Image (cartoon, rainbow, N blue to C red):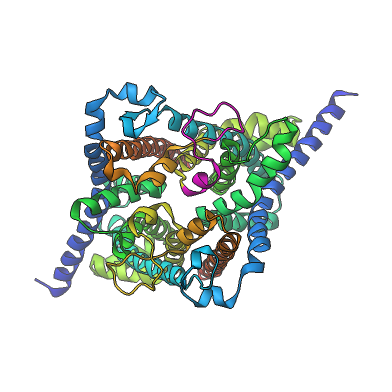
Amino acid sequence: MSNIQRRLRKEKIAKIVMQLSGISITGSLFLIIGTILYKGLPYLSWEMISQTPKGGFYIGKEGGILNAILGSIYLATLSTLLATLIGIPIAIYLDVYVKSKSFFARCCKLLFDVLFGIPSIVYGAIAFSIMVWLGIRASLLGGVITITLLTIPIVVRTIDELLKTIPVDLKNVTFSMGTTRWETARMLLKYIKPGIFTAILLAFGRAIGDVAGVLLTTGFSDNLPKYLDEPTATLPLAIFFQLSSPVPEVQGRAYASALVLTFIILVIVICTHILASKQKKHKI
Amino acid sequence: MDWRLIKDRIVKYTFAFLLFIALGMVLLIFVGLTGKSLPLLQNEPIGQILTESVWSPLKGNFGFLPFIMGTVWVTFISLLIAVPLCTLASAYLVEYASEHLRRLVLPLMNVLAAIPPVLYGVWGVLFVVPVLSRYVAPMFGIDSSGYSVFAGGIVLAVMIFPIMISIMVQVLQTIPQDLKSASLSLGATKWETITKVVLVKARPGLIAAVVLGISRAFGETIAVLMVCGNVPQIPKSLFDAGYPIPALIANNFGEMMSIPLYDSALMFAALLLFVIIFGFNLISRLILNRLEGKN
């Protein structure tokens, strides 16, 4: 075989190998969702998602996981709200009040990038020891604080990326008309509004799915959460606990709970995608 | 003074305050973890803690080696799977795939990134573990429950796919078209161009992507905890159970209060994770920032 034929054959093989690796990576997503769907669907029932655990729930008797669903939604909503209220001002400060190319701003952004990668178990561990030190028991409040800390970097980095896409001229034009920085910032916020929702959804998705952070700080409870200082069940933790049970019915419920969580996450992802494509359309 | 200026000033100080609180957290985490792990460090030299392999808190033995080795095993296995697959797939997406396919695959990667760790864990328990124990282990003539570092590695590999793919695609897209054209016009095939020009030029960015993947794999807790078996031993083969550091922290926090130095040991584990991941993230972000600055 001549040299060129050998090289072309190599090219063909390489292409197939690359396609296969692409397929296996994309396929893993469908494999995960498929597995959960296949195992969870038979156990999913209206009773599951509309009731709190009754007596003997953990040995396979009646009840549902409403407490965990609601707990997770409360936790994620509160912490996303807090993270947005803290994160957006920080991003604005780093972009409008400080020169965004300055050493200080770049250092801060780098630090948020790094914080973004710190695993939630570290946040959970430190929050847990602070709570022990202050004498607070595991509660919704503890979980909210931990998850807020976890999601602030996400909000800051996403908003910062959005602010970067705004033409510098726009900022300069408003400044030259005599606005204060705060007034400019408000104008910029209006400009990136759809993007802000994307950031919020991203943070919400991370908040609702996290386990390691809430494992140590939020505790678990069979009741619906009423006050901030009560232990609260969360959906991921409910999945984790039920899955480690030896009773088949309870394990089945874990699969169904996983399906519920998958569904919530998929809704969030689809909303994010729609918002993001809207944002692109309105770009100048 | 003008009311507008006063408002501007108020907003400025509030925002700065929020920033310093958020950044103060880093310091708080570091100081808090160090302070908490001091009792253990005073009790034993750090070298001994890291290299000793006996873990029996009741007797006051805190050897971290099994956990470090557990973490190293799962991370290494996940990289062995993820790095070649992701490099090849992202090279394909950038160099061969149509715009249409790219727009189809990259959002799917976002979905994969959005899936919570616990669902990966569920998938690991329902799919990876049974497949390993029923089909893969018998092929090697080994009897295994499937709960092993291999299962942990596979689950982690899938978890780090999205971050590696998205960064690798970004990095590969920055390679100048001129370089590729030059190589192609000299008669190189596309594959030769990829291996000898594109991947060489993109090396720092690819390394940064891999390092980010490593730090993600290092800190992942719940998914690994669910599939690794959690036996405090040094894994000797793929099918041995392992006990990575994050799983150690998550599993033992409830009971640590009653045993002296236990909480200190767990805090030391958290400190170890924090320092390593902080360092890894910092390095790769610096590389990526520099690359971004160049373009």
Q: Quadrant of residue A82?
A: bottom left
* Residue at horizontal 37 percent and vertical 31 percent from the top: B56
In the rendered view of the protein, which quadrant contains the N terminus of chain A? top right
Pick the front one: A68 or B260: B260
Horizontal side, residue A112 vs residue A1: left or right: left
Residue A157 lies, in percent from the top left, at: 39, 55
User: What span is colored magenta in the figure?
Assistant: B222-241
Q: Main secondary structure of the magenta part?
A: loop
Horizontal side, residue B2 vs residue A186: left or right: left
Horizontal side, residue A202 vs residue A169: left or right: right
Pick the front one: B176 or A71: A71
Q: Quadrant of residue B77?
A: top right
B6 vs B172: above or below: below
Q: Is residue B56 visible?
A: yes
Pick the front one: A91 or B229: B229
Residue B241 lies, in percent from the top left, at: 55, 35
* Residue at horizontal 42 percent and vertical 27 percent from the top: B65
Verify whether residue B225 appears in magenta.
yes
* Residue at horizontal 47 percent and vertical 29 percent from the top: B69
Verify whether residue A9 appears in magenta.
no
